[in-house]
Image (tube, rainbow, N blue to C red):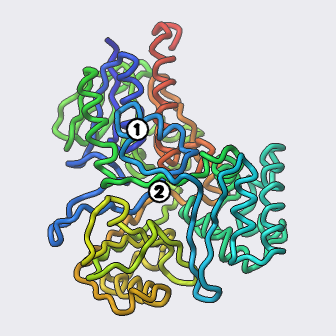
Amino acid sequence: MRRVAIIGGGFAGLAAGVELAARGYRVTVLEARARLGGRAYSFRDDASGEIVDNGQHALMGCYRHTLAFLDRIGAAHKLARQPNLYVPMIDVHRGAGAIACAPLPSPLHLLSGVLRYALLTRTEQIRALLAGMRIMTMRRRHDSRLGQCTVTELLAVLGQSANARRVFWDPVTVATLNESPDRAAAGPFAEVLARAFFRSREDSQFLLPTVGLSDLYTDDARQYLARHGGAVMLRSQVVTLSLREGMVTAVRLRDGSEIETDACICAVPPPALATLLPDAVRKAAALRAIDTFDSCPIVSAHLWFDRPILSSAFLGLLGTTTQWAFNRNQLVGAINDEQQGISAVISAGRDVVEWPAAQIVNTVVADLRTLLPAARTANVVQSVVVKEKRATVSVTPAAERLRPPSTTSVTNLFLAGDWINTGLPPTIESAVCSGQRAAALVVRNLQVPRSAAA
């Protein structure tokens, strides 16, 4: 049985491991930390005893690789799917509105959702739909502008008003790319629109985890690997790769031990990868810029109020520092009329991530009280702030051109992670897609005789 070492136990590494284990390979997943999950995990807060995520995540029906992965490990039932796309929003200037799509075939469902969105004028609604179709045409024709400009620049070319950008386009950009529109690359933005809104009605639906993020996939993936002869090793930091005749033959751990392997997948972020690779590999053309990737944070504030303040499962906030508020009671099915857990999310919060936790909590509470009348008389009984300072790579046009492929200059060494060049922004779907792609490359490599592979 061929052996494969996978470095990194997040979505990418576990997706690669599960794919290979299903094909009969002996997989060893090596994770430096004491837990699985990478940058998408949950933990139990000691003070409150509650399970909180490092950042509330929402999946979409277009996450086909992720949904297939969760289905394979028996975790698909831990997601709650919307029957139709419904995104409630509230703006400090214009009040409430919602993108509420009717149960119609694509793209009619999208047409109904945009034309019902009260925060856009009728003219803005029509121009937004026309802009979406023009972006799809540019994508189909491989228009070079998608690889060169930012989202803000693209929307300016498409004649989108300041209000349309603020209440419609910008929230989509920040939520899906974790980057401000004036920095975010237009290419992955167009890919998100194509897959989420122009493919099928089901692809546009949100799927929200009904459990903590770690509970969604880490234990089930570990158990799947165990059932298929694989292993997960925690607190196992890989410090270097052993190469012989241009091939990875083993990975060396911090304790000095080595794990022999026939192929290796590195599923770690750029800073960690840079320390693992031999100089010759790191200086190869595709990885020469690995040290230049900037990162972008996500800040989450988990608050417990002494009474309910939010009736919907989630709500988009416009004109405030806080961007999204999730009703944890409703998501996890907790019946509690006396308290309500709210998970607030601030993506691309470069300034906010440097604030003290108390300032972040006070800002989120003030935002909620500004927009939600029920919050004005509610008191916070407990709070937890999570700062994921390197949540994703910054997807600028320059960075997009530098994202490496899954292959390397070493024949049996492959890369995975949300930052690899998948054509998608650095999302869970990009991570899973990259892991499955790396697994397919391992299979192809190990089916080739060593003499041919060399």
Quarter residue 145 falls in: bottom right
Q: Which residue is mark 2?
A: 58
- Residue 294 appears left or right of 138: left
In the picture shown, does residue 80 fall above or below 160? Answer: above
Q: Amino acid at mark 1?
A: Leu
Quadrant where the image shows the N terminus = top left
Above-or-below relation of 442 to 201? above
Q: Earlier in the sequence, mark 1 or mark 2?
A: 2
Give x and y (percent) for residue 275.
Answer: 37, 46
The structure residue drawn at horizontal position 59% and vertical position 57%, both measured from the top left corner, is 85
Can you say whether 365 is above or below 40 in the image? below
Q: Residues within 10 Å of mark 2 (few under 14, many from 20)?
A: some
**Picture coordinates of residue 107, whole percent (x, y):** 75, 50
Where is mark 1, residue-wise? 70
Does residue 248 sit above or below 335 in this rendering?
above
Tell me what residue is drawn at x 52 percent, y 31 percent: 437
Q: Quadrant of residue 261?
A: top left
Q: Amino acid at mark 2?
A: Ala
